Amino acid sequence: MSTTFVPTPTVQPLDASVDHAIQSIVSGASTDATCTTDLAAGPWDFDARPGYGPGSSMGDVIPTGAPRQGELPVEYREASEEDLDERIRAAKTTLGDRAVVLGHFYQREEVVRHADYVGDSFQLATAAKERPDAEAIVFCGVHFMAETADLLSGPDQAVILPNLAAGCSMADMADIDQVEDCWEQLADVLGDLDAQDESGRVPVIPVTYMNSSAAIKGFVGRHGGIVCTSSNAQTVLEWAFERGRRVLFFPDQHLGRNTAKAMGVPLDRMPMWNPRKALGGSTVTDLVDSRVILWHGFCSVHRRFTVAQIDQARAEHPGVRVIVHPECPMDVVDAADEAGSTDYIRRAIAAATTPSTFAIGTEINLVRRLAAQFPQHEIFCLDPVVCPCSTMYRIHPGYLAWVLEELVAGRAPNRITVTADVADPARVALERMLAAKPPVVASTR
């Protein structure tokens, strides 16, 4: 009796590349949607123009004088993905320990695969500080992150941002002149901002999210404040409330609101500060009675997520576990099962012991990478439209190959430096942040 051999079907691994997904959409090979077909082009097509480039922040207004990237040599613009991959690996091998590549979770897959460290802003800030042996720190992220790495690295280390046009629209929503003006207006309302009450607390403590310029971090350091990330925001607010009767939180209103609300701060004690309005658009009574004054800023990636998307995910995937980033609007965070930093999201999925379905509300590059990394789970982005972070997406492997080969040749292009008058107080605020480590909490469920 003969038997017929039936081969086991080969399961193709999931492709984590957002670029591949976008190219498929543009070519018609995929029926998925993208927020703009311009994402299929190389970022060098947009670097000379003012604006954040195609993607989630393309509608945001960029400040005059924002950094722009010079022309990338044609050999990198025309190189294939495979060629760039080989050139990056060869340059890294030649450089050895002389260079370290840091990659944010939101970077495209073609860049992240070459990173020596991958993490969120808090983790990469720590990694930059822990590599004093590296002559160059190549930061695959955005401008404020490279500034932070320069603040925490040694004076002989060169911090390189592969594309100078990789800024951050949220960070740009609070510039130093606006913050200084806000501080002066608060002094008019609250009195001497350095005066301590009987419990030793001052009227207000400034807290800036990591997504802010070095100038803003310097302001915070000069005025007794601290930097936070989405990983340690609650720990930082606890620190601030021990020292001040209220907190001025900028630039992301949603992280501030969601964190303070979870700590029991009533919404009516969290007035908004709009820098384009007198007293931020609030009344004197609002400010006097406040516990947290929220800056009118936001992340365009996380503002795309809605309660309707969560409702649809639950309808189509019974039992789905919805996890969103705390930069999402409050109603989205309230409707989700959990909210946490990018690293929290990653750890929550990694800790799931049985095959599960996850709907994730954060940047698409991380979501696709998690789906590829954990194929036993069904993992998808709440937003069905493929729309990556405009500015993170400007770090292309062509730029990474270019800066690494320049380093091999003894040149350090796109070096990010912070002047001493800003750097010294900014380091004070950052050191406070690094000391405010959140407690390790195991993922529930």
Image: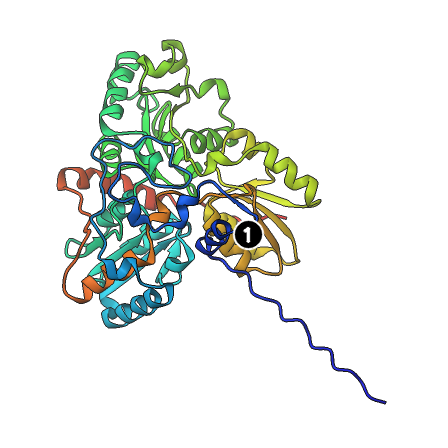
Residue 402's spot in the image, x, y percent? 24, 60
Q: Which residue is depicted at the point 28% across and 56% down?
A: 399
Instruction: Report the number of discs.
Output: 1
Above or below residue 28? Residue 114 is below
Residue lying at the far bottom of the rendered structure: 1
Q: Nearer the viewer, residue 32 or 103?
A: 32
Q: Is residue 73 left or right of residue 141?
A: left
Residue under the image location 63 percent in, 58 percent down: 353
Tell me the element at label 1. Answer: loop
Residue drawn at (23%, 69%) of the image? 95
**Which residue, given by chain and number where applicable, does mark 1 sit on?**
30
Query: Residue 341's x, y, as percent?
Result: 46, 44
To which quarter of the image does residue 412 belong? Answer: bottom left
Based on the displayed image, in which of its 4 quarters is residue 181 positioned? top left
Q: Quadrant of the N terminus?
A: bottom right
Can the viewer see residue 130? no
Q: In percent of the image, x 44 and y 37: which residue is there?
A: 234
Point out residue 53 in the picture as x, y percentages from the top left corner.
34, 41
In the foreground, 170 or 232: 170
Residue type at the position of mark 1: Ser
The residue lying toward the viewer, choosing from 301 and 327, is 301
Seen from this angle, which residue lies furthest right? 1
**How far across and down, in percent of the image, does residue 23 sit?**
46, 53
Q: Nearer the viewer, residue 277 or 315?
A: 315
In the rendered view, does 166 fall on the left or right side of 11? left
Q: Image check: 150 left or right of 262? A: left
